[in-house]
Amino acid sequence: MSATRVFVARLAGCTVFDPAGDRVGKVRDVLVVYRKNDPPLVVGLIVEIPGKRRVFVSIGRVTSIGSGQIITTGLINVRRFEQRGGEVRVIAEMLGRTVVFNDGSGEATIEDVSIEQAPQGGWAISQLFVRRPKTSLSLFAKGATTFAAWNEVREQTTAGQAQSAEQLIATYSDLKPADLANTLLDLPPERMHEVAGELPDGRLADALEEMPEREQVSILTRLGDARAADVLDHMQPDDAADLIAQLPEELGEQLLDLMEPEEADDVRFLLTYAPDTAGGLMTPEPIIVSADATVAEGLALIRRHDLAPALGAAICVTLPPYEPPTGRFLGMVHFQRMLRYPPHERLGTLLDQGLDPVTADTSAAEVTRILASYDLVSVPVVDDNHRLVGVVTIDDVLDYLLPDDWRSHDGNDDVRRRAAARTELTTGSIPLQHGRRTGNGPS
């Protein structure tokens, strides 16, 4: 095995290969155990394999670390990783901790940790890269950095003091929302709340949308009302409505009052519909234009980087006003159809005449059958006056149909379960498993 010193933060995201050169997964963390008189001993890596599952790879099965890649013996236990007592994750739990220098020169914060192979073959922490408190009053100033051996410092354990999550957040800054959510869910509960508390509002909102409702409620209620309302403002209205519906009624109303009026109105609007209907599933923010809008204008609207792909698959055309509930719904234009016509073509001439909208009280089972039967990505939802109130997208339906624990499922369902799912879709007996379906209180 290579005997170079390796900084753990740089290992995050490194690809793990087997001896044949096939990709096994990516490193997400390094696991250590503390020792009484010696530096912490590295016991293994936490590796994310296909299927978003995180597994433990013993350090004894690692043959090489270096050049942005890790080589293993190829023998990996694919059982989902579970942290044991006494084990500490370097990236998730050590970075951001405060240490005190034994020589009395003050304290510092751990920004990175280096591990090194000992002559006898094991790996252990060799040095800490730490930053001292800044001495300048400038807003842009930072404290001096230095290296410290493990025996030169001791960890500060002030009661009630939260561990800084700044370094962990920086390490996972490139993760997609779903991956960030999985990362948070893998952390010990207290650390998860510390990291969530330091995430920017928009980033936390994206991660919450990918979490089970129980964890959503747990994190949101620990933020404080003002911060929680800010995070809800950044969430998609349907996701925010699902989350608020899980809270005690009094708390939900209090948060709605603290939200931006426009965002709160969308959420209240969704909460008026039964949860197992098109109105309860829909997203109230589709792209809406007039019949006189051109293909060029439509394509410009769906190019927005913050637009979900399912919402960008089609544009809704209505009479004024153009905010739900709109004027009379005229039809939808799919983006592929727009690509076949010149930029100056009016969207009112390109409407899909074969697509009928559903009403807000249409059952979730019927909406599912419509999307599947006609290979649609979204279907418009209208009220009794044929005014557009939203669209149900394929991801709304999937979120409704999947079980609550789908994010942590290993993906090895048996044939009987898949057959049962097909039966439910065919008969319309879809179980109430997600969102605003169980009344107040966490599910």
Image: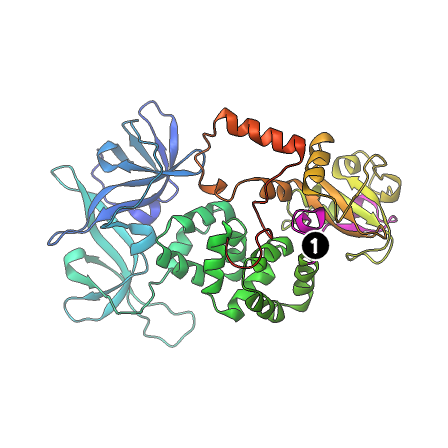
Dot 1 surroundings within 10 Å: few (below 14), some, or many (20 or more)? some
286 is within the stretch colored magenta? yes
Name which quarter of the figure residue 152 lies in. bottom left
Left or right of 38, for residue 255 = right
Q: How is the image coloured?
A: rainbow
Left or right of 163, for residue 374 = right
Comparing 102 with 394, the one in front is 394
When the figure is inspected, residue 4 is found, relative to residue 375, above or below; the finding is below
Hey, what amino acid is under mark 1?
A: Tyr
The residue lying at 39 percent from left, 42 percent from top is 13
How far across and how far down the image is residue 113, in percent? 27, 52
Mark 1 sits on what residue?
A: 273
The residue lying at 67 percent from left, 68 percent from top is 261
Helix, strand or loop for the magenta stretch, by majority:
loop
When the figure is inspected, residue 3 is found, relative to residue 7, above or below; the finding is above
Name which quarter of the figure residue 44 lies in. top left
The part of the chain drawn in magenta is 272-297
Q: How many marks?
A: 1
How far across and how far down the image is residue 299, in percent? 75, 44
How far across and how far down the image is residue 354, in percent? 83, 34
Comparing 184 with 221, the one in front is 221
221 is within the stretch colored magenta? no
When the figure is inspected, residue 352 is found, relative to residue 95, above or below; the finding is above
The residue lying at 66 percent from left, 32 percent from top is 427
Could you tell me if residue 30 is visible in this image? yes
Could you tell me if residue 235 is visible in this image? no
Secondary structure beneath label 1: loop
When the figure is inspected, residue 5 is found, relative to residue 353, above or below; the finding is below
Comparing 135 with 58, the one in front is 58
| Quarter of the image that includes the N terminus | top left
